[in-house]
Amino acid sequence: MYIIIVGGGKVGYYLAKTLLQDEHEVLIIEKDKRKGDIISTDLGAVILRGDGTDSIVMEEAGMARADLAIAVTGDDEDNLMICQMAKKKFAVKRAIARINNPKNERIFKLLGIDNVVSVTDLILAQIEREIPAHSLVHLLTLREAGVSFVEAKVPADSPVVGKPLRSLGVPDDCVIPLIIRQGSGIVPHGETELVVGDEVVAVTTIAKEDVLEKIFSGETQK
């Protein structure tokens, strides 16, 4: 696979290094000479000096034959422009943009960039997983449909431990399609009993995102 990465900062460097180890053909476009020299010294002839938003530079990089274009500069506007040009001018099928401001994700998607990576959201998700007091983790939110996927772990002091799902008072606007137990997935049914440490995945409305906390506290049975 031929992959063009625009942006030779730390993200671009380590991404390229990993992709090269996986035996992909990789080219980094970077306008900063110092960064380019470091990449060239460490990774070899995989660097093209130039402005990644310039169509002439893109053409020189062979964007038209690229399987994937990845824009990871520190500027959201540049990343948007790079991905739009890659898709519309050079017909690259897949383009991935790094976004630094999560608020820009909606704009990117409205402008046809389906694959975006928010560094801020990734860090926040990791923080949420590491903070025990915040037991509710947002896995995926489908805002347009008003639906949210959430996950929570069954605590040791929960009154629902050892009880079947059918007796927990799960509300009508909530579905529990998956339980992860000791690393294995379980598709539950009404008689499935919860045990301590179960990771329960629920699909519910955005307004009821705290549903698992209420179930685990026994509040829904009252």
Image (spheres, rainbow, N blue to C red):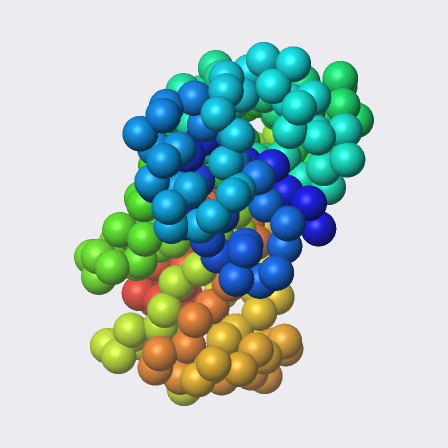
The answer to whether one can see residue 142 in this image is no
Q: Position of residue 131 (x, y in %)?
A: 21, 57
Q: Nearer the viewer, residue 156 or 6?
A: 6
Q: Position of residue 108 (x, y in %)?
A: 57, 22
Q: Position of residue 137 (x, y in %)?
A: 38, 53
202 vs 8: above or below: below
Q: Is residue 107 left or right of residue 118?
A: right
Image quarter of the C terminus: bottom left
100 vs 186: above or below: above
Please identify the quarter of the rendering in which residue 136 is found. Answer: bottom left
122 vs 100: above or below: below
Q: Residue at x 35, y 78 (%)?
A: 197
Q: Is residue 204 left or right of residue 1?
A: left
Q: Residue at x 69, y 45 (%)?
A: 2
Q: How many marks?
A: 0
Please identify the quarter of the rendering in which residue 122 is found. Answer: top left
The answer to whether one can see residue 57 in this image is yes
Q: Position of residue 132 (x, y in %)?
A: 22, 61
168 vs 126: above or below: below
Q: Is residue 37 left or right of residue 167?
A: left
Q: Residue at x 25, y 59 (%)?
A: 130
Q: Nearer the viewer, residue 79 or 214?
A: 79
Q: Nearer the viewer, residue 194 or 29?
A: 29
Q: Nearer the viewer, residue 2 or 69?
A: 2
Q: Residue at x 67, y 18 (%)?
A: 85
Please identify the quarter of the rendering in which residue 3 is found. Answer: top right
